[in-house]
Amino acid sequence: MVSLYGTEIASRLLLGTARYPSPAILEEAVRRSGTGIVTVSLRREMAGVKKDGDRNRGGAFFEMIRALGVRVLPNTAGCHSVQEAVLTAKMAREVFSTDWIKLEVIGHHDSLQPDVFALVEAARILVSEGFKVFPYTTEDLVVGEKLLAAGCKVLMPWCAPIGSAMGPVNPAALRAYRAAFPEVPLIVDAGIGRPSHATAVMELGYDAVLLNTAVSGAGDPAAMAEAFGQAIAAGRMAYLADPLSPRDMAVPSTPVIGKAVFDLPPDLPASTGRAVA
Ligand SMILES: CC(=O)[C@@H](O)[C@H](O)COP(=O)(O)O
């Protein structure tokens, strides 16, 4: 269970809904992942409506998402300014009847790195209008503090650029971020490529993982979704089980007391009591 804005969610995997080979495969992936939250890009779906002229396209997709029976976290993917993000969030609130919003304000064309200045500003506006904001951010500690001061109760640092599948490129920064915000639910968002990446960030103590491309772009998205569900649960269990820290020196894993002796020196009295193998 993870608690996000006072709502208890059973799965620690948040799944994106973009770029699946078909709606049926998306549905199957959601089901097999065990996720309790899917994120949906309002802007992307509405843009699709404009492009192909099919005015039902966006509506049909949103209906299908609603029918999945999981919580919807609309997102502002593709927004590049405060105004655009705020407007998209308001439209999403109407379409999905939710005050939850995953806030993305993209600042850099190639890396899709968030514009953290605009992000903080948009978060401040949306919180003041009653939204529960999930900000997609970098692992910058100061930006994290400013987002909390703006009223965010959850932080979502990236582990690598969106869609890159690189996995955690800066584990030390993610560790420092976790340590800096011990009481805040932290969700790693973007850049995860494999289930082992998700396990690794969960072992650092992150509360959940949000991912899309690693599942939708896999050869078998539904099977990959299930693998991610299990990997995230395993990482959480390992974190709670208090894993060892790495050491520089070898430490025998077999106890030496009472071990068998293979070649006793000839002058050793039998009274030493050492076993002879
Ligand atoms: C779907 C969504 O919200 C993405 O913008 C998100 O950041 C996931 O990134 P990946 O596709 O790299 O998992």
Image: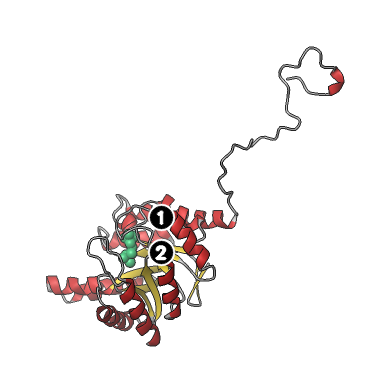
**Dividing the picture into quarters, in which one does residue 23 lie?**
bottom left
Give the answer, above or below, for where 165 lies relative to 40. above
Count neighbours of disc 2 (C-alpha within 10 A) and say few if under 14, some if 14 to 19, many if 20 or more.
many
Query: Looking at numbered disc 1 in the image, what kind of residue is underneath it?
Result: Asn
Q: Considering depth in this image, is 196 or 120 the residue closer to the camera?
A: 120
Residue 263: where, in percent of width, then height? 72, 16
Whether the residues at callouts 2 and 1 have beta carbons within 8 Å, the answer is yes
Residue at image position (37%, 68%) is: 137
Give the answer, above or below, for where 60 lies relative to 28. below
| Distance between mark 2 and mark 1 Cα atoms | 9 Å
Query: Looking at numbered disc 2 in the image, what kind of residue is underneath it?
Result: Glu
Residue that carries the numbered disc 1 in the rendered image: 170
Residue 210 as seen in the image, left or right of residue 260:
left
Secondary structure at numbered mark 2: loop
Residue 246 as seen in the image, left or right of residue 256:
left
> Which residue is the extreme one toward the right?
271
Residue 56 as seen in the image, left or right of residue 1:
left
Q: Considering depth in this image, is 21 or 89 the residue closer to the camera?
A: 89
Secondary structure at numbered mark 1: loop
Give the answer, above or below, for where 228 lies relative to 146. above
Q: Earlier in the sequence, mark 2 or mark 1?
A: 2
Residue that carries the numbered disc 2 in the rendered image: 139
Residue at image position (59%, 49%) is: 244
Residue 275: where, in percent of width, then height? 78, 23
Count neighbours of disc 1 (C-alpha within 10 A) and say few if under 14, some if 14 to 19, many if 20 or more.
few
> Which residue is the extreme one toward the bottom?
129
**Dividing the picture into quarters, in which one does residue 91 lie?**
bottom left
Residue at image position (28%, 78%) is: 85
